[in-house]
Structure formats: C-alpha cells, structure tokens
Image (cartoon, rainbow, N blue to C red):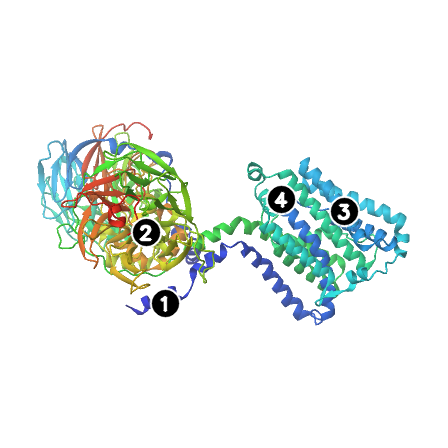
Amino acid sequence: MSLSENMTRWRYKYVPDKAIGEILSKNWIDTLIPAFFLSVVLIIFGTQMPTFLSAANLSDIGRIYGEYLFIAIGLTIVMMAGGIDLSVGSTFALCNFVALSFINYMEWPIAVGMIVVVAVGAFVGLINGILIGYLRLRAFLTTLVMLIIVRAIVDMLLLDYAMIIGRGFNMSPVWEFMALGDILGLPASLMAAIAVAILAHITLTRLRFGWHVMAVGGSRRSAFNAGIKVKRTVCLTYVISGALCGLAACFYAARLSSASADVGRGLEVTILTAVVLGGISLGGGRGSVVKAALGTLIILLVQNSLIQMGFLSGNSSLILGGVLLAAVAIDVRWVKNRHKVLARAYVSPTYFKLPDLPDTSQGSDSPYALNDKLRGVEAIGLGELDGPEDMIFDRDDNMYCGSRHGDVMRIFAPDYKRVEVFAHIGGHPLGMAFDAEDNLHVCVGGMGLFKVAPDRTVTKLSDETNRSWTSIVDDSRLRLADDLDIAPDGRVFFSEATVRYEMYDWMVDALEARGNGRIICYDPKTDTSRTVVPNKQLPNGICVEFEGQSLLYAETWGCRITRYWFDGPKKGQTEVIIENLPGYPDNINRASDGTYWCALCGMRSPVFDLAQEMPGFRRRMVQAVARDDWLYPNMNTGCVIKFDRDGNILDTLWDLGGEAHPMITSIREHKGYLYLGGIYNNRVGRYPIEGADQNWTSSVSYWGKNRGGTRK
Amino acid sequence: MISYFKRAMDNFRGSGEAAVTVPSLDGAIRPNHLLERAKVAATAEAPDQIVASDGTVLYSSGPGLYLLGDGTEFHRFDSNISAVAAGPDGVLAVGLTQGGVQIVGGRHDGVVLEEAFSCPVALLFDGADTLFVANGSAQYPANQWKHDLMSKGCSGSVWRVNLANQQAERIMDKLAWPYGLGLSPGGLIVTEAWKHRVSQRGSDGKVTHVLNDLPGYPARISPTADGGWWLAVFAPRNQLTEFILRESVFRARMMAEIEPDHWAAPALEQSDTYMRPLQGGAQKHLGVVKPWAPTLSYGLVIRLDHKLYPLFSQHSRADGRRHGITSVVEIDQQVYAASKGGDVVLALTDIKERATV
C-alpha cells in the first residue's frame, strides 16, 4: 500500500466528515448564526469600551433585557404562526400608562394591578387577533393601524392625566423589588423573563398549542387540512403577544415610573430587528425562543453601547436599520439555500478497499463461474406481485411475501396461482420469519419489526433501539429494518441496513461505504431492543445456524459473511467466514442439506470497486452529477450461492443477462424447490434443486414437527 | 492570460469547459424508437461503414468488405477496416486499423499510403486524383478510440493527398478525433467527435464551427440528394463521463487498471455484463430498463439541412440494442445505417417524417 493511499485511509478514518452533514440537518443549526453575531458584538464592544463588561453596566442592561425579552417572545410566537405584530410599542406604552395609573397613583394591590395591566395588553392583542385571525385582515396593515390608534389613545390620555399620574408613588416592597431587586444576582425582570422564556420554549417545542403554531406558520393550508383550528391559533398568538407587552410594561413602570410620550416609541422596530436577527423567519414556521433571546441580546448590546459611546440617536437608528436589512437578507438567503447546503454535505463517502475481484468467467475453475442454471425458472405471481423482497412458507405450504404497497401477500398452495392480501402493514415488508407459534415476524422498511398472527392481527414489536452515545443524530429510531431470524429461545435478531438513509435511498449508502448499519436483538420477554453488533456495512441477511447458538449475517457493501455467537461459550464473538465475494450478499437462509443459501443482489464492477478507494471522487461526483447519473453498484445482475458452515462455496446459480431475475434479494428452500425474490421484481421464481430433500421445510427445521408446537 | 483565468473560474464554478452538463435531447433531437423499429438490411459483426460504389452497396465489417444484398465478400484485407471511401469508376480507398490507406481499383490501383496515417478513420474522394484522409489521433490506432477519448486526445489531423504523385498535405490539425468528412459548396466538412461538433473549412482555410453542442459523439457524415446531410452519432454524452473526464487521478487509474470494455466511458454496444458500471437511473425495476435511463451507448442519426441545422432524428434508446451508429448513407432514396454496436445494417424508413415518440 502506497503512502498516499495510507494517508487517504487515515484521513477518512479519523476525520468525521459525516458529522458536518448531520449537524447541518439539526434544527438548532440556525441558532449558530445569531450566536456568531453575538460573539462578534461582544468582542468588538468588549475591546472598544472599558466599561462594557463592568458589573453596573451589565446589571442595567440585564433589567432592560428582561423587559425586551417579554415583548420579543410575544412577537416570536406571532411570527412563528406566520404573522407580524407592529403594535407592540404602542401596546407597551398603553400598558405602562395603565400600570402607573392603577398601581402607582391609585395604589391598587400589585397582583390585581398587574392582572389588569396584562388584561389590557391582551385585550389589544385580542382586537388584533380577531381582525387578523377571524376576519382575515392583513397582519402588517392591521397592526400598523393599531400602532397608530393605540398611540393616539396614549397621547390623549397623557395630555389629560400625565401630571396627576406623575405624582403617584407606590410604597409596596414588591413593587420596589420588581424595579430594583435581584434574584441570585440577576435582576428580577430578567429572572421573570427567563421563566417566561422557558415556559414559551416548552410550549412551542413540546406542547400541542406550540405545534399548532408551528404548523400554521409552516403551511396554513396544510394545517387547516390536518384539522388544526387555524383562526383560533392565529388569534391566540396576538393575545399572547399583547399580554406579554403588558407584563413587560409592569416591570418598566416599576423601574422608571415615567409617563412620558416617548415610552415605547420605535420599540416595534427594535424588537422586530432583534427577532429577525435571531433567525425567526418572516415567512413563519421557523424559529425558537432561544434565537429570539439571542437576537434581542445582540440588539440591546449594540443599542446600549452605541449610546454610551456617544452616538446621537439618529445614528443609532441608522445602524439599527442597517442591521435589520442585513438580518432580513440573511434570513431569506439562508432559508432558501439551507437544504442545498445540506444536500451537498450529507453524503459523506469514506475509504474502502476490497481485494481483487474474484474470477467469474464462464468455464473457469472459479466456484463462482458463470452458468445458465436459473434461465427459464418458473414465475409465480407474475404481474401481481410488486417487490417481494423475501418470501416464506407456512406449515400448509402457502407462501407469504411482501409488496411495495405495504402489504403482506399470501399465495396459496399447491399451484401458487391465487394471490391475496394477507395483512396490511403500511411499509414495504422485507425479511420474514415464523416463530414457534406460527406468528409471522416481518421487518418493515421505515417502520420496524412487526408480528402478524395467523388470524391476521398486526402487532408492532419494536421501532427503536438504544441510542448510541457518539451519534449526533438520534439513531434510536429504526430507519430500515431489513432481515431477521429467530433464536430457539424466541429472541429476534434483525438487521438495520443503515441509520443514515431512508428505505428508497438505501443504495446511496453504497457511495458512503461506511459501517452505517447494525444488528439488533429484540427480546420478547422484556419487550425491548438492544443493538448487539454496531457499525456494519449494510448488514442485510440474518440466519440462525442449525446449532442455535450463532447466526450468520451478510454485509452487503462489505461483500462478506460473518458469524456472530449470541449464546454458548463464544458468546459475543464474531468471525468472518466468507470474504471478498464477487457480489453484494443479501438474505441468507438454511438449505436442506445442512448448508446455507445466500442471494447476491448485485455484482461488483471494477470501476465501482476503484471508486470505493477514492472517497473524494465519490464526494465530488455526488455534488456535481445529477442523482440518476451517479455511479452505483451493479444491481442489474444477481446470483445465488450455496456455502457450508466453514465458508466453502459449494454451488453458484446464475441468470445471465438478468432477464427474469435481474436482482435477487432473497432465496428460500421449501420441499425441493428454491424460491427467488427481488425487491424490484414483479415475480417470485421457482427453481427445482437437484437431489434436494423433497420433504424439508424451514418450519420443521426451526421449530420441529408439531404445528404451533413447543419450542425446541 | 484571460483564458487562464477563465479556465480557473470554470473549474471553480463547474461552468464552460469544466461543466458536466450535457445538452438535452429536445427539438429536432427529441427521442423516438424509429431506429429500433427499422428494417434489418443485413446482419453482420460490427458493421462500420457503408459506401455506394459503381452501383453496388458495400459495407465494411472486420477485415472484409461485403455486398449489402447477399452478403458476399467483395474484398478482404490484412487487418480490420477503419474507413472506406468510394470514388469515381468503382475505385475504393480503404483505411486499416493497423495504419495506412490502400487504393483498390481505378487508375491508382494498389497504391498504399502509409506515411502519417496511423489512424485513418474517415476518407473522402474529391475527383479521381484527390483523397482527403482524416487521421483520428496521432497517439492511438483506430480501435483504441476509447483511450483517445479518455485521455482527452486532441491530436487528429486532416490531409489532402494527391494520388498521382502521392504528395500529402496537412490541411487541419489538433483535432479531437475527426471522424467524418464531407464536401459541401462551402468547403470541407469535418466532424470532431470529442468536441461534439461539426466544422466547415472554407477554401481559404478558415474553419467555422457550424454545429455545436451535440448530445453525443458524431461519427461519419454523408450527403443527401437535396443538399442536406445525414449525421451518425455513435455514442451519447453522459454526465458521469463528462465528470470523469475532469477527474484526472481517477481516469488515470481506471485506464491503467481496468479493461477498456469495463470502463465508465462511452461504448458502442449495449452490454449485459455486470463488469460494466451501472448508473442509478439504469436500475431495472419490475424487470424493465427505462428508455430514458442514463446509458453509455445509444443509437442516433440526425438529418441536417444544407446549412447543417438539425431537421429530425431517429433513435435507439437505453432499452434498445441498435447502438453505436457509425455511418448513415443515402443511396437512391434508400437510407442505410450501420449499427456497429448492434451488429446490424439497417434500412431506415419514415425518413421524411418528423420525430414522434
């Protein structure tokens, strides 16, 4: 192996490329943008202004931040539902006036006063909500008008009562605490705002109302079609926004007792800039409270610092406006291009070198030599089946197989002409096995492990396993359960082909060549699943060996078959028994003579083998070339091999040209015949095995002669 | 200097020369199945070129020249024939894979031109005494066209030979596999396979690229009765091939380690072997390869008008077999096409009709 090849190997072993794509696919990735801006702001002002990080400055900022944060959260909720609220500044001013009147001047109890203030805010919000939610007025114009009207009311009130209110003073310690108090060193308003923020975050991400808000903002029509009460949800978001303005005004009133006409003027632009900068999309449906909080913090720091640095207020507004423009531009471009970045970064190939391709030429001494044995095999269910990945037989010789439409099909013995839907599961059924009580166990792509009883009741056995510690994406959900087999004690061992791709992208996994799959054990006694063999290259076929202590599994992209002991003295150990197959192994099943059959679903081509050694080539290909033109493993030719427990190849069956069975994903021996299935095929093939035991069935081989009998 | 920056920019953006995009089959080149449905005029192993000589129609296959009607052998050579041209009075010029051009019949019978013609892939008589020779490549013989393509060959040349004194004059060079020659009133027409274009060389020596951005690699071109042209396109362009042409390390290893038949490169014939790489869209579903699947081989003939603009075309698509059309010839209102990849000579029908699916 040359030096550069070694370098490539080490490079792809230790640099986790796939992490980039997985991080990009996370929802919180958007938060990195405001977090980056925040650090820039901190660095700039922290170095330029000596007093910037002083305790007094931070405490001042903290109090204002608390007040701003209430309003920002309210606006965030409105914007997540696809709306906008420009009336927050005026509402804030009105609530400030009300708070000063009732609490300061009339000296109502604080609790009652605050409730009234919040109610006034909520009432303004309700008017907005009814107009926008129920009467379907434009949010922008409606709240703009509301901004003017409420501001006019405040101005009129101030004209008459400003002097009177200014004389009031509430001596209550609670009121003073709201203004000046600290909890754990943080200003009271900030603590309250943090509590509200946590509540809002939980509501938006975990509770029904929050999901409705996200759904309405993401797609109003779809949300309506899904049965969400769109009008009510929209209306409620404005009510919440108004109420939070009221809450903010309480703290503001307590702190400053100011009833000037400037209160809340221009606040809507400041808060809007803050949340858009934080990454709350103007289009709705995207955002989080954390982002709003980050955005608000940035704006506040900038605003505050600019004033302290002696900029006139006009300059400060100019800068704020510039920031808003930039934030909107970034928002639009990022939302538009995010999925493109993700698509380019997600497929992350790694280095994989296979030994030289074994000889398969016709007439050679190779055990894999080409022949024509599968030419003209009998077709079952031709045109009626669609995608029988695996098939199996019950004790009455009826055949069961999957279909792309999400059904388990039953084909009746003895002539296998009549086809019916045995059970509908919903996902494409792949591997199948019967247990001791004649329940059919099925791996369903995209869904998990299911059980179909003889009376057709469908039960989900497992759709998750333990999450691995190092994975960035949540890999506990089963994405592509593939094949299974059942141990004598009833434990189900099944393979999950890949954790990075969905059912219909499984071949893209070949371009990565990484061990993305795993083998999982489902224990019916505890009804739980655990991963027993992680990080395999598309683990596919599973077959419990005749001795009942070990199983054989095929790694499709690894071109090898491995033994894994789940019981006995070698428990937990693995041993590779066949390496360097000429093709990609799929399902493995028992043969009547104590050996095993394995289907090769596709064959290796020299060009693809070469590409596997050059991960950079594959990555660039994925980025530059259209998806349909990508280089794939050759899945248009398949074959069947027979091997013994030591891994010696005993026989190979070919269908040259791939007329009837271009891709063989499964084989099953039953009463002297070998049945062939293909995930993209429209039939099951039937091939008479020369010299096979005419009475051998897999049911008897696994569970003995008694129907529905006791376990072996 | 500007061209250097343009190249660097193209490489960065994947545009211009560095683009992997291929022209779509649209307009006059909209796909149909006409080649697949055409009548078989003869079955032969890898028929390459068809010529009309002295009232008979001949096609070349391997080292032999055969009569189209009954398939009798007309002439046989020491090595495979790489090009044929017919001149006045039954004279034939034959290029050989081993190199060199032989004259059979006529007043220059027996003349052998060996000098410089290591890869004669197209020949054309202009009167009895002048022969144009297109030498595909200076590096590779005619049967190693795939090597020349995948090494981005650009060493082809066109020569004018005076048969009387056997003086050869090079009139064009640095061509990317000149594969077809024709004489039009405006000058000499040359197809440049690897550049996907048809060029015209005026009598003053000025070259214009008349037909550009073909969706495949053009082969021979031949005149029709009404002054138009038939253009044979022997292999399709493919995004994967275009991409591999940009990947020099991969290309070098592929050429060094893998047999040419199994390369990810354009091919003449549709192949069943799994040793040839598969592209995602060519995966068989329910036993069927889709006609629009990405493919390394294709059958395409394009009818051009007198200005070399495409009028209509006939196709054999990804699910077909009549691929690798290397020559199309119109003889007495009958059009024949040699499908080198499909091992047949076709008699085309429906030639007046526009392409329909």
Marks counted in the figure total 4
Residue type at numbered disc 4? Gly
Q: Amino acid type of disc 1?
A: Trp
Give the mark toward the camera: 4 or 2. 2
Query: Toward the viewer: A481 or A652?
Result: A481
Mark 1 closeness class: few <14, some 14–19, many ≥20 residues within 10 Å = few
Category of crowding for the residue at label 3, using alpha-carbon neighbours closer than 10 angstroms: few (below 14), some (14–19), many (at least 20) = many
Label 4 – label 2 distance at C-alpha = 51 Å
Q: Residue at x 33, y 60 (%)?
A: A614
Q: Residue A233 falls in which quadrant of the image?
A: top right
What is the three-letter code of the residue carrying label 2?
A: Ile
Which label sits on residue A10? Answer: 1
Q: Which residue is mark 2?
A: A486
- Mark 2 → mark 3, Cα distance in angstroms: 63 Å
Disc nearer the start of the sequence (2/3): 3
The first of marks 1 and 3 along the sequence is 1
Is label 2 on the same chain as label 3?
yes
Q: Amino acid at mark 3?
A: Ala
